[in-house]
Amino acid sequence: MSIMTFISPPRLRALLAIFGITLAGGCNRTPAPSLQVVSAGTVQQYTPDTGQKFSTSISPFAQVDLAFKSGGLVEDILQVRGNDRRMRPVGVGDKVGAGTELARVRVADYQLRVQAAQAAVDQAKAQRAAAQANQEDAKFNYDRATSLYQTASLTKPDYDRAVQQYTSAVASIQAAQASIASAQSDLDTAKLALRDTAIRAPFPGWIVGRYIERGMLAGNSTKAFTMVDTRRVKATFAVPDYTLSEIRIGQRQDLRLDTVPETVHGMVTAISQVADPSSRVFSVEITIANPKDTLRPGMIGSLTIGQGQGGPPCLVVPLSAITSSKDTANGFAVFLVQENAGKTYARSHDVQVGRTYGNSIEVVGGLAAGQRIVVVGGPFLIDGQEVRIIP
């Protein structure tokens, strides 16, 4: 099954440009040497298949780079048993579970920071306890002074002194509370930095890159590992605009891969809303369950979009065989290979073009299956020129 589409002359010229084929106008061809070297092929009969076939590549559902958040000397790397039964550092091709500690930098410095921060919290709490005791005394004196002052049994200076002592005690408690909050924040930061001395796997998956060794100095952004999650994988491919009507989110899609004997089933989970500015195609993503790790990133597969009826048999030639007509503006032609008196000549023959099928295109106009045509070198020929055929 192949990509099928009707094609207009301007679109054909653009398509040929993609394949690196240049169409030269017949009336402007520069006279070529008397003998031109070309490659030949034949007109083929082709029965169009159903739907449109696309190639796709498999990629992991998720891929992440793991880096240290707390820098230091790499003290430990997870050890796994290799095929030789010896222990070795975890590396490319190893599978690890979610939360597995993969590596750690030296923790001694961070433990000291935690201890210092904890001591600061304890000291702040002790200061708050002392301030609370002082506040209780100040409150008792303040209540007593207020009662005496209201009965004119206490002088105004003594009352003001009791008020000031109580106000100062309350302020001391507030300051102690602020000190505790600041010290607790420092402690939380120190504990977080201590936890961040280790890199842990964020999901069950495969190690596809390791960039550290034990004993090296790692910064707080040094990349250490690359991991992929292949419990599900994605198949991505690109389609032209006229195919979008046959694709929708949630659509079930079957894929074939050369390395997997059975058909793979997936679901369309994303369709690009904007075409690629250079190729004018839209990206489509299919998500596939992969519980047995049968599918691996980098595998190439194919899929068919659409369930239309295949057409009747037609004649096709390689796109590289199409040249400009020497008689019709914006027309197309092929060069037929003809033998005469032991010599080989190329004769221009006008054709009409139809659908494209991959790298081939439908042609009509007095051709028959099996006729020899020039497939490489046509744009440099003139009608009736002698040619030499090379394989």
Image (spheres, rainbow, N blue to C red):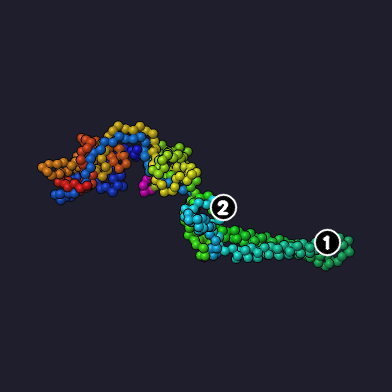
Q: Residues within 10 Å of mark 2 (few under 14, many from 20)?
A: few
Q: Amino acid at mark 2?
A: Gly
Q: Secondary structure at mark 1?
A: helix
Quick one: quadrant of the N terminus?
Answer: top left
Farthest residue, direction front: 85
Q: Residue 204, how many percent across, how many down?
A: 53, 49
Q: Which mark is residue 334?
A: none
Q: Position of residue 144 (x, y in %)?
A: 85, 62
Task: Pinpoint residue 198: horizontal percent, then vertical percent.
Answer: 56, 58
User: Circle 2 sits in a helix, a strand or a loop, which is it?
Assistant: loop
- Region of the chain picked out in magenta, as a range: 277-281
Q: Which residue position holds label 1?
A: 140
**Residue 342 rendering spot, x and y as whole percentages:** 12, 43
Vertical comparison of 34 with 351: above or below: below
Report the front residue among 133 and 347: 347
Residue at 52 percent of width and 52 percent of height: 96
Nearer to us: label 1 or label 2: 2
Q: Residue at x 48, y 60 (%)?
A: 211
Amino acid carrying label 1: it is Phe
Side (left or right) of 332 relative to 141: left
Q: Is residue 370 magenta?
A: no
Q: How far is the residue under mark 1 from the one under mark 2?
A: 56 Å
* Label 2 sits on residue: 99
